Amino acid sequence: MLRTAQAVYIGIGAGNAVGRVVEQIVELAGQSRFEEAAMAKAPTRQSKLIRFLAMHAAVGVAVAVLMVGLALAFDVMNLWTLVSASDAGLLAVTVMTVFFAITFGSAQMGFALMFAMTAEAPPSSGRWRALFARLLPRRVDPSLVVVPPSRRR
């Protein structure tokens, strides 16, 4: 696009209004390429989140492959016997591994996200503070607790 705009600019000339517009387009195109290069170098918050999720998904996939391997190695419910005797055994193992990978990868990402939220301080909005205040355990004075007579020692 930049070369096309430069060719149009050369054909039109810098003297008229269209030439000035094309000149501004060429400047903006050059700036956007520079900004894209600068943004590619600095990791953004979104790229950190994607990296966080991808890392935990990879952990889940590794656990899934390990689980399938262990199930086959220990011949759980005669799985290895069935797979080795079947013509479509490789397909069955592949499908099982893919489904395990989807399940364990998703579960690991969810687990990581839920525990990442508890590691940080709760959000500062009043609604969230009230929600967290209800969820967090509180210390209770033992003398205030009413114990039914059937449970007393």
Image: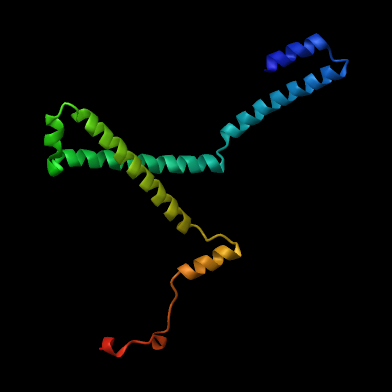
Please identify the quarter of the rendering in which residue 14 is found: top right
Q: Quadrant of the C terminus?
A: bottom left
Horizontally, residue 134 falls left or right of residue 152, namely: right
Horizontally, residue 94 falls left or right of residue 118, namely: left
Spot occupied by residue 24 in the image (x, y as percentages of width and height):
78, 23
Horizontally, residue 62 falls left or right of residue 139, namely: left
* Of the pair 117 and 127, the residue shown nearer to us: 127
The relative height of residue 27 versus residue 52 in the rendered view (above or below) is: above
Please identify the quarter of the rendering in which residue 63 is found: top left
Please identify the quarter of the rendering in which residue 37 is found: top right
The relative height of residue 32 versus residue 110 in the rendered view (above or below) is: above
Q: Residue at x 50, y 66 (%)?
A: 132
The relative height of residue 32 versus residue 118 in the rendered view (above or below) is: above
Q: Quadrant of the N terminus?
A: top right
* Of the pair 34 and 83, the residue shown nearer to us: 83
Spot occupied by residue 122 in the image (x, y as percentages of width and height):
53, 61
Spot occupied by residue 113 in the image (x, y as percentages of width and height):
44, 51
